[in-house]
Image (cartoon, rainbow, N blue to C red):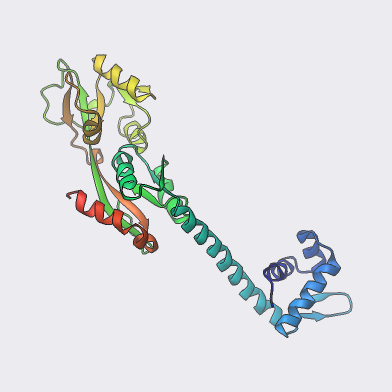
Amino acid sequence: MVEFNQLEQLICIAENKTISKAAEKLLISQPALSRSMQKLEEDLNVQLFDHYKNKVILNKNGELVVEYAKEIIKNVYSMIQDVQSFDQSSKSISIAACAPAPLWDIEPILKELYPHIEVQSEIINQDNLIPSLKNKDYHFVITPFEVNDKDILCIPYIEEDLYLSIPPMHYLKDKKEVSFHELDGETMLLYSNIGFWHDMHIRTMPNTKFLFQNERSTFTEIVKASTLPSFTSNLSIKREGKMDNRILIPFIDDEAHVTFYMTLLKKDKHKYIDLINKIDNYYDF
């Protein structure tokens, strides 16, 4: 019976050109490697090497077996990864987003649907969402864009709209709407742990002086007591309530409105069909 390590050894010989160099790479003796290859030839009942006076080289049979060996090993490693991922999915569900607000609703939904499974969430860079999903680092990712990929299922999940938050005596208090351009150059309070929104504010308002705060409750108290403008959103208001002493003005910029999508691999759809149905029925788009 052909053994897995024999195939790995054969590939190593092909890559290093000689049995002696392959033996050094594999940290085994050359006689041991030669015996292993002789056993492989016996198992296949085919000669894989041509023997000359001072060297042994792979023949056409050997080259063909190397190509099959590479594919077999690739499939074995893929199987191991899939089985480990399947096993992990029965114990925990991991999800990533590029902003905190989309996670606020999804975590309770997951815990309701899968009460015996641990839910793990993380905020990562927007550019890493799809690569991380394809690499199976997460079971789901929440993207601020629709993904067009034959292997990926993308479901509209939740919408977030930004608002300018100002005190009642601010000079913009009578505005019905506002733009990032109008505020560029102002001094503003900004909660920094907001994922991709942070980078968007820096990019769209390069002349604004932002006063950053990393701790959410502290940031909220500062906003309540401050005369400086800040940002909030419909999802933040839903979670924390509207401050009594602040006026909210919507932004007209397209970037101030985002539809988030629940994104997963299509092959995992059957495992999470309850979640998919819940999202489809729960949110009205």
Position of 74 compared to 96: left or right?
A: right
In the image, residue 157 above or below residue 190: below
Tell how many labels: 0
Position of 189 compared to 24: left or right?
A: left
Where residue 18 appears, as percent x and y from the top left, is 79, 69
In the image, residue 63 above or below residue 220: below
Q: Nearer the viewer, residue 27 or 281?
A: 281
Residue at the image point whose x is 69% and y is 69% from the top: 11
Do we see residue 271 in this rendering?
yes
Q: Nearer the viewer, residue 248 or 172?
A: 248
Position of 164 compared to 115: left or right?
A: left
Q: Residue furthest bottom?
A: 45
Q: Residue furthest right?
A: 53
Residue at the image point whose x is 28% and y is 23% from the top: 185
Quarter placement of the N terminus: bottom right
Where residue 237 appears, as percent x and y from the top left, is 22, 31
Q: Residue furthest front?
A: 116
Where residue 56 appears, as percent x and y from the top left, is 82, 76
Where residue 95 appears, as percent x and y from the top left, is 39, 46
Do we see residue 60 in this rendering?
no
Residue at the image point whose x is 25% and y is 56% from the top: 277
Say which quarter of the image contains residue 165.
top left
Residue at the image point whose x is 19% and y is 26% from the top: 242
